[in-house]
Every structure is written in C-alpha cells, then in structure tokens.
Amino acid sequence: MDKPGDYNAVDALLDANVAKGFGDKPAFVDPARTLTYGELQVASNQVANMLCGLEIRREGRVAVLMYDTVDYPCVFWGAIRAGIVPVCINTLLKTDNYAYMLADSRVEALIISAPLLEIVRPLLKDMPLLKHIIVSGGDGSEYSDLNDLMEQASDEFETIATSGDETAFWLYSSGSTGAPKGVRHVHTSMEYVASNYGKEIIGIQHDDVCFSAAKLFFAYGLGASMAIPMSVGATTILLPERPTPEAVLNLFGIYNPTLFFGVPTLYTAMLASPDCKLENSSNRLRLCISAGEALPAEIGRCWEKTMETEIIDGIGSTEMLHVFLSNRPGEVRYGSSGREITGYKLRLADEDGHSVRDGDLGELLVSGGSAGDGYWNQRAKSRATFAGMWVHTGDKYTRDAEGYYYYCGRTDDMFKVSGRWVSPFEIEQALSVHPAVLEAAVVAQEDDQGLVKPKAYVVLNEGVCSDGLYEELKEHVKKEAGLWKYPRWVDFVDDLPKTATGKIQRFKLRA
C-alpha cells in the first residue's frame, strides 16, 4: 500500500466496482432505501459538487453527525472524492461533547441527521468557523436540506488526485480513558484494512451481505460496513437505530446477512434475550466477528452453541483503524484475541520497552500500514502513542508459544495484589461465567491498611436477587481465577458506565 503518488480511496473502493459491472448491484440498504453502486457513484459526485459549491476547499473539514442510513456513504465518499476531509462523529453523545469536537476539529460544515439537530442547536451560535448546517432525513427548518442541495448539484465530478499519504478522514477515539482525540487517517488505510483483514481473515466475497451493529462513526463499524464490503462489491445492511437484541434479530430475519459484526456487550445482551434462538438467526450466516474489546470465552462458546456459528474475536483500535490481531475461522480459541495477521507486526514490551518472553506480561505494540497519522493538535500524546513504526495500544497481553495473544487489561487498569499482577479482565471473565451474572467490571481499591485489592461492580441477570451472592461470587472467583484474585468488595449495580461504543469506562468506577 505504498502509494505516495496519485491515489484517492474513492477510486479503489467505489468507482472500481462500477467499472467491474456492479453498478446495478445494491451497495447499501437501510429500512427505507436501497442504493446501488452506480447510484452511490452519482450521489458522491453530487455531494462533491455541493461541498465545492459551498466554497469548502481541498483539505477543508466537514463534520458528519449522521445515523447509519444510505445518506452516510453518499456524504462520506462525496467529501473524499473532492479531497475534503469528513470528520466522523459519534451520534450518541451530549451537547458538551459536540461543542468540544466541533470546535476542536474546526469544521466548516456540519452535515447532521434531523433528529440530532436539537442536541447541537444550543451551541451553533458559538461556532464562528462553522459556516454551513446541512440536514439529512427531515425538516431542518432554517437549515439547508441535504437532498435538495444534492439535486441542485451536477452529477459529474472529476475526482481530485489526492496523495495516498494525504489525510482522507478523521475518527475520534472513544474516550474510554478521557477526552476523545481526533485521529487522522490517510487515503490508503481503508484498502489496507480490506485487503489484510477483510480478504485474508474473513474471506469477504462479492456475494456476501454484511451487517455491523457497530456504527459507521466507529472505526470497527467503518471497516465492517464500508471498507471491507466495498473492496469486493458486497452489500451492506445499515441500521439507523440502536442495535438492541430485538432490532438485530429482526434484521437477521429480514435480510439474512452472511457476516455479522458485533461487540462483546451486544453478544452478551443477545444471549440474555429469550428470542436468541437458532430459528431466529440468519439462515445464511457463515461467520460472526467480535471486536471493540476482548470477548469473554464463555460468551463465545455459548453463542456458538446457541446459534451454531463461531465468533472470531479480534482486537483493533481507532489509531489502527481496524482489527490487526484476530482468531481465524476454524481455528478459534475462545478467551484469546487470536494471532498476528498479514500486514501487521506485533510485539509485547515491558515497562522499559524491551520485548518480553512468551508467557510474560507486556504492553501490545503494533506496526502496520493502516496506522493513523497522529492525533490532531495533541503533540505529546501523538509522540507517546505513535512511536516511529510502532503504535502503543495501551493494552496488556500475554502470548503463548503458538502465537495466540491473551488480553489482560488496559495498562491503566492493571494492578498488583500481594506482589503479583492481576488482570481485571480475568476476574471479570470468572464472574461472567456465574449463572447469576450478566456482566461485571473490576477495578483496584485500597483497603483500610492501604493495600490494593480487587473491587467488583456486578450487573445481575433479570430477576436474580443479590442476597447472599457476595460470598458465593467470592468463592467462585477463587476457584475460576486464583485464590488471591477474588473481589474483596462487590457492588451490585443496574448498569456499568460505558462509552457509546460499548467499552466499560473503568476510570469512572475508580473515581
């Protein structure tokens, strides 16, 4: 993917499909509309002309705050075709979060789904650099309508000859450990992901139908719904609403996807649903994928037993755009994140930066062609994370002699008990196996003597009473994880603090 000369991602992932004869094939389907590859090509030309008509110049930025409908790829690829940078923003945040991101990214235009307008309206008067508000999918009142502007624009546009090393789009990190950071990704990154993960690991084919519960604003969802399927001319199903177990199973029945991209939180919730039965699955489902955070082994085994489809768990990051470490179909080891995949190099390093031996704990470092080009306006954090060819993930892992990696927790989440490292994830996995437990999070807390011990926050399954459970859970963890790892305190809670992408925010529990 060393393409420093003329290279625009829209040529490789959109126009190439039309050239191959896929112009009449559905590219994206939402509950209201279907968009073929040919229609997407035309729509992206219209968006490119629309943005240029608004005097947004090459390398200018536009915020994309939109639900997952067929309008999203039109806007995303239209901006990229014009050499303009779409900044993909989470649709599940609050007004203050949007104030931060819109000001931080200095976008000139905001393209927003109509139902989200009221959330951002109070801050728009304080955005002097934001010149244009464009509304998708409804009455924007005083603001311009996306479809009206597209209809007024020409459907012919000469794609800008960008460089492969030029910034194509931004994604904001999820904020699981603090304020989100804008990650800049270059034009070649999406094709790199599609080639090394989409084709090599999941074997994406043009007749696949992909459905990702992870949204397009999320790095995992962007790869699952756009980069990977578009690399071969496959079809993607989009769900604008929240991916509840009921909504996901409903789409399984309507569209029969062949590939499903989920996250551990959703797989857990689906298994807790009485409707999670084989007869309610897609009759063409050949593979399920999990990423976002580590998949508990018991959830993977239970899903495969229930739905008769294995889950290949892997790990990626916003900084690396997509999955770089993964299990393979037919070679799944539940409880592991799999093995290094083509196009990436991995190593585990100790606190001094030295590589560790198999079996020892270390921070996971990754090198590969989909790495971001740094954080926007965060020089110190960029230098700490993007260290030459290596990207620091902040994840602690061990590796076995066969090259399988086992997640132990975030660097900031690890702690020592009686002089020995404890992985919160290991205790959480042990708790999740107990039939009373829906999910759990573990953090460090000091006891009366100032010694660090594990504390657990536990969400129980519906209808389960917590009376007497503390002692039972304590003994259960001793048996499953180790005598010194049991939680000294257990708080039973209704839910756990999470990012919009489903990652547990342990720093909030520590606070």
Image (spheres, helix red, strand yellow):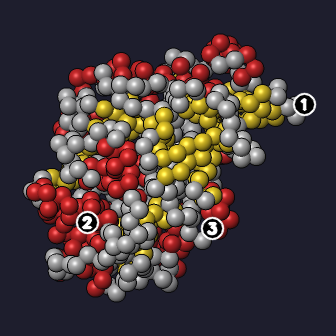
Instruction: Give the residue drawn at x 34%, y 50%.
Output: 194
Q: Are marks 2 and 3 in contact (CB under 8 Å)?
A: no
Q: Which residue is mark 3?
A: 378
State the CA–CA distance, disc 2 to disc 3.
31 Å
Residue 318 appears anywhere in the view: no
Nearer the N terminus, badge 2 or badge 3?
2
- Which badge, 2 or 1, is on the more N-terminal residue? 2
Cβ atoms at labels 1 and 3 below 8 Å apart: no
Relative to 229, is 475 above or below?
above
Label 2 and label 1: CA atoms lie apart by 63 Å
Quarter of the picture holding the N terminus: bottom left
Would you place residue 304 above or below residue 34 in this image?
above
Residue type at the position of mark 3: Gln
Kindly identify which residue carries mark 1: 449
Residue 487, placed above or below residue 171: above
Task: Indicate left or right for 204 with 494 as reference.
Answer: left
Vertical order, 423 against 118 (above or below): above
Question: How far across and down, in percent of the image, does residue 333 sit?
Answer: 46, 24
Picture coordinates of residue 245 (x, y %)? 35, 35
Check disc 2 and report the residue beneath it.
11
